[in-house]
Image: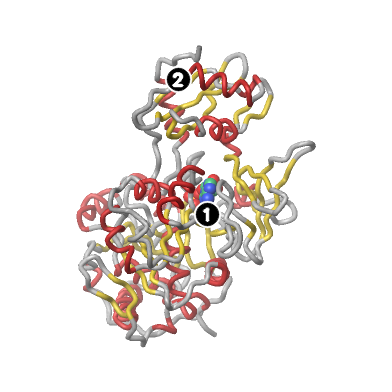
Amino acid sequence: MANHLYDALFARHETSDHAFLHLPDDTVLTHRSFAQITAALAGMLAALGIRPGDRVAAQVEKSPTSLALYAACLRVGAVFLPLNIAYTDHEVAFFLKDCAASVLFCDPSRADQLRQGLSGSTLKILTMAPDGTGDWQTAGDPQTRITDRTGDDLAAILYTSGTTGRPKGAMLSHDNLLSNARTLVNLWGFSDADTLLHALPVYHSHGLFVACNVSILAGAQMIYLQKFDPDHVINALPRSTVMMGVPTFYTRLLACDGFDREVSQSMRLFISGSAPLLAQTHEAFEALTGHRILERYGLTETSMNTSNPLTGPRKSGTVGLPLPGVDVRIETTDNETTGEIEVKGPNVFKGYWGLKDKTAEAFTEDGYFRTGDLGEIDEDGYITIVGRSKDLIISGGLNIYPKEIETIIDAQPDVYESAVIGLPDPDFGERVIAMIVEAPGHTLDQGALSKVLAQSLAKFKLPKEMITVSGLPRNAMGKVMKKDLRDIASQQKLTSPP
Ligand code: AMP
């Protein structure tokens, strides 16, 4: 037997003295040194009595040691549960209880409070500081044994952000993760000649499974930044060949004086995902750097599903073509071109932890995962996401896709960006509201905008109110928090367009 994911990602590099992680203090960690940290962590997990299948939670800062904890969990056959550092004690307690975790790694500053809050449970709490030190170092001797695991065994549980209802633990198997990483290495041309600029958080599928798994599988190096800071990114770009980012990375880089064609000269690829990349960002980025950002699309439950090609047209506003081996279809109803995106393939997760009914609801009868995203497909097979099904506005019984309205508003010179939401309405069920961020130095001409909208859209789709806001609330992955916008809009005194 063997360990499906650990062998492919980590075991084969264990005795290599090649550089693996370039750290902010200019030190370089080799694969061999990383494997030693992994062995120390694996020994500690074994000493704690962690057995294959046990859940190991981590709410710690991004560091080489926290990445080694992921490797150590795979090595001993445990299921890794990374948690956003921003979660409150109350939220953390929910996740730990929900999946009956055996151990939690936390930042030393949080330990006392968490221990108090969780007293009475059998859970063990250990500390891990951003520099990798902590009381985890007191237990066990390094362990080099690798536990057998098949492709079907669980590697990780990632909780979905839970924007509707309670968060659900998506169970991802060794093969879910490895099959996707293999596909992406080939599709994006990754090799050991690459250096990935890593500025994403690693509690999310994007930073951990897309960025790290793909780089490690290809034998690439990573410039491992603690977080996204435009100055640090600009400083590291000349030593990098690929960057993966959320759209906010790209808009923030474009706003920096030091970002230009010269600093991106060594780059062969910029990739974007997790939220929609505005066409204007795409164009401005290409004009400045000569690079066309490659946009791709995925979810916690499926890892990546579609991507624009490495060679061949990268169509802005689209998320590209289905990945090889991944079956993507759009379930339309009669006479509609828009429908829910459904996915089937080795990348699709095993279900939600402890939620048989929710899992069953998430799949069609013929085994496709319902993504909850609404999409369209063009004549070349490229997919465009037009919104989330839960964002769909139904006004007077008619379907309204916010993205259709946002695209028109965003194209106006006095608009930087917009988000269209629905608010409850006694007559229509829901009414359309546009939240608009003005372009720098511009004042929105609501009258002119209303005219443009009226020329392009059926009357029932026209916003009933427009509200200018200083910015759109986004989470760490760059997603616009429409729920927060609905709260803001319902509290504001709304101004009607003339
Ligand atoms: P998460 O599970 O946190 O990774 O969020 C997945 C959701 O992010 C998807 O269901 C999409 O709504 C959204 N998403 C991911 N990539 C893109 C993209 N390239 N364009 C638009 N939305 C995206």
State whether label 1 is within 8 Å of ligand 1. Answer: yes
Depth order, front residue of 146/185 = 185
Q: Residue furthest bottom?
A: 15
What amino acid type is highlighted by mark number 2?
Asp
The residue beneath circle 1 is 295
Distance between mark 1 and mark 2 Cα atoms: 32 Å
Q: Which residue is mark 2?
A: 445
* Image quarter in which the N terminus is found: bottom right
How many numbered circles are shown? 2
Give the class, few, some or many, for how many residues have Cα within 10 Å of label 2's Cα (few <14, many ≥20). few
Q: Amino acid at mark 1?
A: Glu
Residue 361 percent coordinates (x, y): 65, 47
Rate crowding at label 1 as few (under 14), some (14 to 19) or many (20 or more) other CA atoms within 10 Å: many
Q: Position of residue 411 (x, y in %)?
A: 51, 33
Q: Is residue 167 above or below residue 190?
A: above
Precedes in sequence: disc 1 or disc 2: 1
Q: Nearer the viewer, residue 232 or 175?
A: 232
Task: Tell me the SS state at disc 2.
Answer: loop
Asked whether 125 or 417 is in front, the reply is 417
Relative to 391, 7 lies left or right: left
- Res. 311 visible in picture: yes
- Above-or-below relation of 192 to 243: below
